[in-house]
Every structure is written in structure tokens, then in C-alpha cells.
Amino acid sequence: MTVGVVFVTHRAKRHLPRCLPPILESPLKPRVVVMNSSSSDGTVELAEEMGAETLVIPRSEFNHGLSREKARRFLKTDIVVMMTPDAYAESSDMLEHLIRPIAEGKAAVSYARQIPHDGAVFFESFPRAFNYPETSEIRSYEDRKRYGVYTIFCSDSCAAYSNRALDEAGGFSHALIGEDTFTAAKLLKRGHKIAYAADAIVKHSHRYSLRQEFQRHFDTGLARKLNENLLKDYAADEKRGRQYVLQMLEILAKKQPLSIPYALLQSGVKYLGYRLGKMSSNAPLWLKKICSGQDFYWKKSS
């Protein structure tokens, strides 16, 4: 099966020496495309020097869903892998582990295990441990009562898709954020399965400020409200959110009790952003711009 890899980038030159080599050196010999939303930091030039193809789009036209759709149609490979440049594969065989469930016909989408970058603090590493366990699994639409909204959990920081299945489901759609989750929901509703490949490992984590956490969760809440028809068959996000907070506090109580006040503050900021986003589908554009972290998304709406 032919394999293509898309790195979605903007001002990502500093990441290329870490993210590209393990993929370019993969025994699968994938086509590797660095899609760039017109940054001027040398990302495109370095990507070409390193041996990747490039696809440049105007920043004002970038969209998390439709831009990925454009890239996968550009590649036309049997399997397309979506990655972000700050996700560093641990080895050159990561792609083989990632696509195996698709190549073996067990799933239509497969996503990698994410571990924190070196030097990550607790609030960067805990989300990785919570969302990315050590054991692989395959989930289907029928598992929704067991897993709730986690059934369709997926991350395009490193995820592989069957292009044939994407064609059947209409591909990636317009999305403020969360195109991976919405695409997984469409695929599972059509009878496909999603695989979590714990043996496909990438280093990927973020150190967000409280402002960034608010913006990120505002965008998540708004996007989920706009796509609520895809999510109506799954338990509410709040249920998994409660599980997250309780597990986090339990660990902090044992290991870092002095960090509990910040954990509560951070959780409150996240929830406030999420709830405001859920209520803002009909809010004025100026309010969405202020609360959102996706500056490019709103420029074309002005």
C-alpha cells in the first residue's frame, strides 16, 4: 500500500530537523509533504532541502479540516498520515507500527501514542498519560456506551487514515479545530473502526499559559457545538473531563500537593472557555475573535 505523510506547518523551521528525518528514513518510503500556510521563516526552503515535497497555501485560506483534505487529495496515496511538526517520531519504524491496523484491514484510522517532550513538567505530561495508555486497542461505534466520547478520540498530531474510507465518508470537513475527532465520528458511524497504536510513539506535548488554555477550550467548545450532530450519540465531554480532573488531583495529592491550587485554577479556566465556546455559535464575530486562539480562522470571516 502506498503511504503519504502530511506535516501541517506554520513557522516550523526549527522543528524540521527533529520531525522529518525519522519519517524520510522510514522503510515504507512514504511521500512526505510539508504543507505550509505561507510562513516566511524558511520552513518551505529547509523542507525541500531535506527531501520533502512542499505545498503552500495562503494563511487566510488555512483551515484545519479543508486544508488537510486538500493535502490528502494532493497525495492520492492508499494511506495518508497527518502530523504536526512538533510531534517527533521516536524511531524510523514508527510509521510501520502506525499504519499496521489499516494495512491489516482492522481499522480505517489509527493514531499514535504521544509521550511528553524531554523536560516536560507535570501539567504537560499528565494529559499524555491520561489520554495515551501503554496498551493498544481498537474501538468501534458499538463501544460508545463503554467509552463515551473517548470512543472517537483521535489526534492529527500523528494519525493515519485509509484514503478509501475517507472518500466514502466525504473526507475532512471544514473545522475550526477538532477535525480528527469529527472525522473519526463519521468513519465509525459508517461501520469503520479506530485503532490506537501504542507501539507507534511520538514525543509531543505543550506548555500552555492559562490564556492559551482558555482559548484552546473556547475553540473546542465552539467547534463541538457546531458539529453536535456528529457527537450526539456519545456521552458528554464533561463526563470525561471530570475523570481527568479527579485523576489529576489524586496524583497531585500524593506527589505534588502544593500544585493543587494551580490545578484547580487551570481546570476552572479550561471549563469556562469550553462552556463559553459552547454558547457562542451565534455570538458576534468580535467576541469569537477575542476568545479564540485560531487567528487565521476569523480573518476570512471579517
Image (cartoon, rainbow, N blue to C red):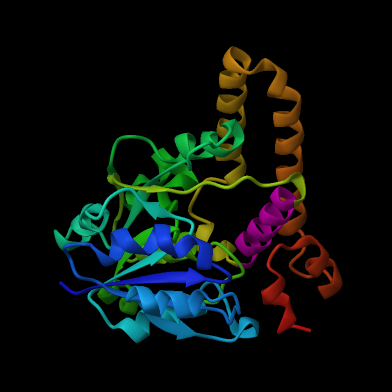
For the point 57% across and 33% down, which residue is it?
A: 244
x then y, percent, for residue 282: 78, 70
**Res 191 seen here:** no
Residue 16 figure quarter: bottom left
Farthest residue toward the top? 254
Say how many tags the image has: 0
> What range of the chain is rendered magenta?
212-226
Our reading of the magenta stretch's main secondary structure is: helix
**In this picture, residue 223 sits left or right of residue 28:** right
x then y, percent, for residue 274: 70, 51
For the point 70% across and 37% down, which residue is it?
A: 267
Q: Please state which of residues 199 and 164 is positioned toward the viewer in this rendering.
A: 199
x then y, percent, for residue 257: 67, 16
In the image, residue 161 sits, relative to residue 238, either above or below, namely below
Q: Quadrant of the C terminus?
A: bottom right
Whether residue 222 is in magenta: the answer is yes
Q: Quadrant of the N terminus?
A: bottom left
**In this picture, residue 270 sits left or right of residue 286:** left
For the point 74% across and 63% down, which residue is it?
A: 292
**Res 250 seen here:** yes
Q: Please state which of residues 56 and 200 is positioned toward the viewer in this rendering.
A: 56
**In this picture, residue 66 sits left or right of residue 290:** left
In the image, residue 198 sits, relative to residue 94, either above or below, namely above
Whether residue 293 is in magenta: the answer is no
For the point 74% across and 30% down, which residue is it?
A: 262
x then y, percent, for residue 269: 76, 43
